[in-house]
Image: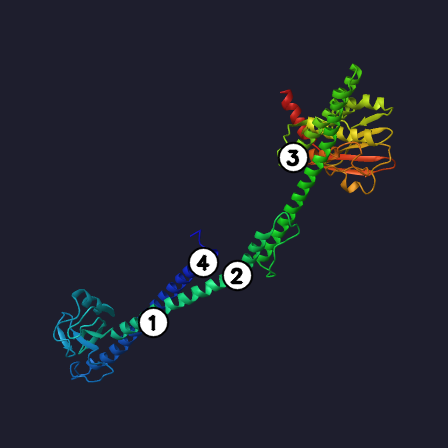
Amino acid sequence: MRSLPIRIRVAGAFALAMTIVLVAASSFVYASLAAHLTTAFDHDLRLRAEDLRALVRQPGESLRATTDARLIESGEAYAQLVDPRGHVVDATRSLGAASLLRPVELRQALREPTFVNRATVPGLDEPSRFLATRVERGGKPFVLVVGATRADRTETLSSLRDGLLVAVPLALLLATIAGYLLAGVAMRPVETMRRRAASISADAPGERLPVPRTGDELERLGETLNAMLARLEAAVERERGFVADAGHELRTPLALLRTELELALRHGATVDELRESIRAASGEAERLVQLAEDLLLIARSDKGELPLRLELIELDALIVSVATRFEWRFADAGRRIVHSAPPGAFVRADRIRLEQALGNLVDNALRHGAGTVRVEAVQEAKTISLHVADEGPGFPPEFLPHAFERFSRAGPDRSTAGSGLGLAIVETIASAHGGTVGAATGAPGADAWITLPLVARSETSASVLVSDG
């Protein structure tokens, strides 16, 4: 069933539903008509019984002698008068002297009117139904039986059944054909989208599926698929740009490394020259290692596989640790680094990753900024921001919207120092911790920050109690 086209499956489901509806409707009509005919039949028997009751009460009147077709229709209706002992007192000619009532039925008829069905009665070889009711004659109780064959009812129901056996399959066939055609019309936009989707490739960006303006699920499906294509196209372009930028960044240190090794091989006449070439090659190798680690971190983040070892971290100690690590580089550059943090401020984070992100901000301020660098934590209601600000020229205005993008540099070309991944890694680590990043140009200098969720004091107190216990 699953291998069949949707159009056939829809038509099949429609045919099954119509079969159930038609069979149920036909059964209801048949049962309703049967009940109506039975009710009408019983009502006619009551009317005949009333007329015949008046007849048998009159002296000298006999059921055998009556010729009124409205009361006794020859070949179809009959009547019988039975005494309480079951003896037939009077009857129409076709019945003879045998009582139609069994003893139980006779006793019940003396108490209340009783309807009885018979497969056959004497002189009539057709199913019949009669009404047995009490009647007084000459001051004595008798039971009057008034009945008729059910031939008319049977013929009417048979005609209806034959008509339904023809009409229902025909209606089902027409409904199935209509369902098949309607399913084809409904599936036509889907087939159009399928053919267009089969022709779309990564080599032809910008192509989209045709969206039927129907205002229903098909239109929403087309819009959703087009939005997905736009996301995939953006992801492909981003991936291509990432690969191209990564190749460019790897090519430069590899070329320099090869040049230094060739110089050492061909022109390293003295030990000092060899050491200088090896030192330069070692620096380029270190740059390659750092670039590979940065690329690996970003790739893991894109796949959602960036591992984090979360713990409660006091920000004052974290900032001191990062600032201490950079103090000698600031001293060599003749600059200062100062830091501050509110006491008792905690975040739940991976210490190594958070130190890496904050260190990247400090390194960026050291290499591209000027003057004193301030590292401080600014606490708000539910968050805390780690700011790194310097006194240099600040970020160019056109660079700010792209500051945390991969391979983005504030310089005019790729000759600018750095790989352009430092701030991108900051954004990656912040996002992995559920935080955000930002950058601005102040007066003076640049300011870049990481905003993280602040841990409530109750959580830090509970953690301290657990660790002490």
Q: Along the horizontal axis of the image, is 15 left or right of 245?
A: left
Check disc 1 and give the amino acid type.
Gly
Q: Which residue position holds label 1?
A: 163
Check disc 4 and give the amino acid type.
Ile
Q: Which residue position holds label 4?
A: 8
Pointer 4 with pointer 2, Cβ within 8 A: no
Pointer 2 with pointer 1, Cβ within 8 A: no
First in residue order: circle 4 vs circle 2 = 4
Of all residues, the one furthest to the front in this rendering is 266
The nearer-to-camera label among 3 and 1 is 3
SS label for mark 4: helix
SS label for mark 2: helix
Q: Position of residue 51 (x, y in %)?
A: 25, 80
Q: Position of residue 156 (x, y in %)?
A: 30, 74
Q: Along the horizontal axis of the image, is 122 left or right of 167?
A: left
First in residue order: circle 2 vs circle 3 = 2
Q: Which residue position holds label 3?
A: 299
- The image quadrant of residue 456 is top right
First in residue order: circle 1 vs circle 4 = 4
Alpha-carbon span between mark 4 and mark 2: 12 Å
SS label for mark 3: helix
